[in-house]
Image (cartoon, helix red, strand yellow):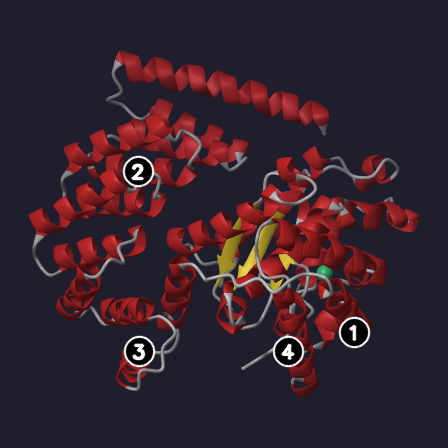
């Protein structure tokens, strides 16, 4: 089902009031264009709202890691690799990917499942990356002198209103003025053409098959004709026409055919997303059929998808058996190892599962999803001292990962260490740019009894630091 909305905006469930109203006034920024620093700040605030309130936001470290691996490979080949991108998945069947302020790029599961190969997905991401590196949003704002008095808040709302399910979003969110701004923010044909051109170069430089770009967009356009109802937003904000597609095809001339093999992770991520669709029983049946009819591009990924579906059914025995079969072949990856370790623990073999985790962590020390899952398993099985030691060690290695602090906070909570629990949560919020919430947690940490001298001084010192940072940010605004 090719429902089409390759739009550019933010999902619709977030309402105006939810957005931090301390965002800077657009008036200051419009003349000179928006600085990347301001863009980043706005992007981060919208990202926080998405994490908290957007039901389709997919908090899946494995899918996220894959998108960032693919996206950063492309970003490294883009004209401005230093921007710093963050790619995140949404569990939404609409075919969609969208760039927000500051390099935050959302990718719908519908897109990942609709592409026919990894180069096609890379092509769409390269186009979105180019909207960011070419500063299209900032340039779009600078062009519109008449909205210079409008706050960025209103503009963020306008972006939210651009989401596909406009009928659901309804009147609650999109005020008349937001609608007017949204219309002005739709990408011009010039911006689209530039994103196509730069995206094409990026795709080529990153080593993907450049023919995939026109192939996918042409398929999308054919689908648009059949799904008129889902198309309007896309057509308003992302004009896709015959001319764009023929431009892409012209660029392909002179590029020799390049065979690019899809990565195993690409297939595994698709299987994982597919296995999340429908009821668990439907998902199991879907993958079983693929395997019996031998209609599969990648048997390992199809078996992995079946195991994910079994896991959704809580049939851990079958999940373990299916994964054990894959592991006997040469295909081992962090994703397969993670699920296999979990399956063993869930069906009752705690020691065996934990040792699979440890072996995998040795082999893939940078696989964050393994780190979270091992910590979760220790917590769930009340190995609290081991869990604390493991999180301390993981945070020493990667002190900029908010997920680690959130897990650490839960482990402290389970251990009855309330002060440290609040302090860990404060660190997570600070990393997400939520200074007020971080300060609140530190004040809670101060109030709880039972902190030793060392912990108390650490909490006090951190609180002073964050308050200072908050004052500095207030001055900048
Ligand atoms: Zn575009």
Element at badge 2?
loop
Question: Image point 73% across, 69% down: which residue?
Answer: 249
- Identify the image quadrant of the C terminus: top right
* Residue that badge 1 annotates: 241
Instruction: Establish if 47 lies above or below 294.
Output: above
Q: Residues within 10 Å of mark 3 (few under 14, many from 20)?
A: many
Q: How many marks?
A: 4
Please report contact status of discs 2 and 1: CB closer than 8 Å, yes or no.
no
Residue 324 locus on image (x, y percent): 16, 62
Please report contact status of discs 3 and 2: CB closer than 8 Å, yes or no.
no
Question: Image point 54% across, 68% down: which residue?
Answer: 111
Sequence-wise, the earlier of marks 3 and 2 is 3
Numbered circle sitting on residue 287: 3
Sequence-wise, the earlier of marks 1 and 3 is 1
Query: Which mark's residue is nearer the viewer, 4 or 3?
Result: 4
Instruction: Establish if 58 lies above or below 143.
Output: below
- Identify the image quadrant of the N terminus: bottom right
């Amino acid at each position: 089902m090719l429902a089409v909305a390759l739009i550019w905006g933010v999902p619709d469930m977030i309402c105006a009031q939810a957005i931090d109203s301390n965002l800077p006034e657009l008036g200051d920024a419009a003349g000179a264009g928006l600085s990347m620093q301001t863009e980043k700040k706005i992007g981060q605030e919208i990202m926080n709202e998405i994490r908290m309130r957007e039901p389709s936001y997919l908090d899946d470290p494995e899918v996220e890691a894959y998108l960032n691996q693919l996206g950063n490979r492309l970003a490294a080949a883009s004209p401005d690799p230093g921007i710093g991108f963050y790619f995140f998945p949404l569990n939404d069947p609409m075919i969609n990917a969208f760039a927000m302020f500051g390099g935050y790029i959302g990718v719908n599961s519908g897109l990942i499942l609709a592409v026919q190969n990894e180069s096609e997905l890379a092509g769409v991401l390269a186009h979105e990356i180019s909207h960011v590196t070419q500063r299209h949003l900032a340039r779009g704002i600078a062009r519109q002198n008449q909205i210079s008095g409008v706050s960025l808040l209103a503009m963020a709302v306008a972006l939210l209103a651009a989401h596909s399910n406009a009928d659901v979003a309804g009147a609650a969110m999109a005020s008349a003025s937001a609608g007017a701004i949204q219309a002005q923010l739709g990408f011009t044909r010039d911006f689209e053409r530039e994103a196509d051109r730069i995206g094409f170069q990026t795709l080529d430089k990153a080593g993907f098959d450049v023919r995939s770009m026109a192939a996918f967009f042409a398929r999308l356009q054919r689908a648009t004709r059949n799904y008129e109802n889902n198309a309007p937003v896309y057509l308003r904000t992302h004009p896709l026409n015959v001319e764009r597609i023929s431009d892409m095809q012209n660029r392909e001339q002179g590029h020799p055919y390049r065979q690019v093999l899809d990565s195993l992770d690409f297939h595994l991520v698709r299987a994982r997303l597919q296995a999340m669709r429908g009821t668990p029983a439907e998902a199991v049946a879907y993958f079983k059929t693929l395997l019996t009819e031998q209609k599969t591009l990648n048997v390992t990924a199809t078996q992995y998808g079946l195991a994910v579906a079994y896991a959704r059914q809580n049939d851990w025995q079958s999940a373990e058996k299916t994964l054990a079969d894959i592991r006997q072949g040469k295909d081992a990856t962090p994703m397969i190892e993670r699920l296999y370790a979990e399956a063993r623990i869930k069906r009752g073999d705690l020691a065996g599962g934990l040792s699979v985790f440890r072996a995998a962590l040795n082999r893939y020390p940078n696989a964050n999803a393994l780190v979270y899952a091992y910590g979760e398993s220790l917590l769930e099985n009340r190995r609290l001292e081991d869990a604390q030691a493991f999180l301390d060690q993981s945070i020493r290695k990667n002190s900029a990962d908010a997920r680690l602090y959130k897990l650490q906070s839960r482990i402290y909570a389970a251990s009855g260490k309330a002060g440290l629990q609040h302090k860990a949560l404060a660190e997570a919020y600070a990393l997400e740019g939520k200074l007020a919430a971080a300060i609140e947690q530190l004040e809670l940490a101060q109030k709880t009894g039972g902190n030793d001298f060392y912990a108390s001084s650490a909490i006090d010192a951190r609180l002073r630091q964050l308050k200072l940072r908050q004052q500095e940010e207030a001055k900048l605004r």
